[in-house]
Amino acid sequence: MTAALPELEPQLIESMHQLYRELHAAPELSMQEHATAHRLEAFLDELDIEHFRCGGTGVVGILRNGDGPTVAFRADTDGLPVAEDTGLEYASTARGQLDDGTEVPLMHACGHDTHMATAMTAIRVLVANPDAWAGTLVIIFQPGEETAAGAQAMIEDGLWEKAPKPEVVYGQHVMPNLTGTINYSIGDAMSMADSWKVTLYGRGSHGSQPQDSTDPIVLGAHIITRIQGVVSREIDPRDAAVVTVGTFHAGLKENIIPATAEFTLNVRNLDASTRQVVLAALRRIIQGEAMTSGAPEPKIEELSTFPRNYNDPTETTAAMSALKNELGEKAVIETEPLMGSEDFGALAAAIEVPSVFWMYGGHPQKRLDAGRVPVNHSPFFAPVMEPTLSTGLRAALAVLLSKLGRS
């Protein structure tokens, strides 16, 4: 039986809105969330909640309220190098530096500001209503989700040695779906993903003397064309796989054959065995085409690896039952897995406990009907404040109280 939600006062909702505006205007890059971490620590100090730093800019709070289950809830904290173009009065004008020193504009273009604001408000509700629940909540404010660095950094920094081990880990994410609704999948929720940077080596020459060159641009063109056949000809069509080449850089002048070329690629899969087949095929083609061209062996560097994000069937069914009780049957919709990726799954996998991850919508029907809805990572991504934030808050509380609530 799910415990009834404490009444959500208008003042509480307005304070959540103010938190959201504040966080939205102050994004920081992955693993650079220093001011955000200080803000979260100040919030936890204000409520006299035990907390500690983990993984550099990660913050973990521990709410203890007597005997009962232990559960964890994650909210991610990083922004993106995107120039905001939403027209919001609280739009971000922040700037930051990439690891190579490049200055970039910053934006919460993936909605992590909504994740923090709803999680912080859920904490406030639980602290104000100790008679409504019992047990321990581990709240994980995780950095570096966009680069798949944050969850692993927290695990390696001893997250589960420092915090009580939960029986389940929960998380949620705002998406460009109908606001007021929840989407979820049972089993695989999102795809695994791998990103590589590939450097090709050749021999430079003048454009009028191609016989003296080993052209890395031609080599790269052959590789990029060839790898598009991996999914269509080496993978069972019933298995999901995507291969994308996102960048290609080479040369400085039209009549000079350069000595090197560089491209980046991204691979997405739902199945671990399919993932290995695709990655092995990519390596074979990259190395084989270089050999055929008489070029040195290319350099392949791993940029990021997103783990499996798996929704435990039993825990997911229970959580969705709580959400249906709170939001209504029609508002909670089972969908196919997403081909987007998350590092959330690593938190539970590290201690072999189940996890549940769901999506809440951020756009009104009118915007959806108009088409060309701004998606996550777009400079125009701006979820409507309501009922988006209230839905995220109610969802978090409903699922947490389904475990921790006093029935």
Image (tube, rainbow, N blue to C red):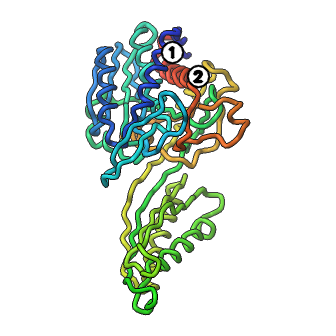
Residue of label 2: 386
Q: Residue at x 71, y 31 (%)?
A: 366
Disc number for residue 198: none
**Mark 1: which amino acid?**
Ile
Residue 53, image x, y percentages:
26, 32
Residue 358, image x, y percentages:
55, 34
How busy is the neighbourhood of tag 2: few (under 14 within 10 Å), some, or many (20 plus)? Answer: some
| Residue 195, picture quadrant | bottom left
User: Tag 1, which secondary structure?
Assistant: helix
Query: In the displayed structure, does residue 178 sit left or right of residue 175?
Result: right
Q: Residue furthest top?
A: 131
Question: Which quadrant of the figure contains the N terminus?
Answer: top right
Residue 35, image x, y percentages:
31, 32
Q: Residues at badges 1 and 2 in contact (C-beta under 8 Å)?
A: yes
Residue of label 1: 13
Can residue 314 be seen from the camera position used here?
A: no
Query: In the displayed structure, does residue 143 sit left or right of residue 210?
Result: left
Residue 193, image x, y percentages:
48, 53
Which one is earlier in the sequence, the residue at label 1 or at label 2? 1
How busy is the neighbourhood of tag 1: few (under 14 within 10 Å), some, or many (20 plus)? Answer: some
Residue 284 versus residue 222: which sits nearer the camera?
222
Count of numbered tags? 2
Position of 97 relative to 138 (above/below):
below
Q: Residue at x 40, y 35 (%)?
A: 27
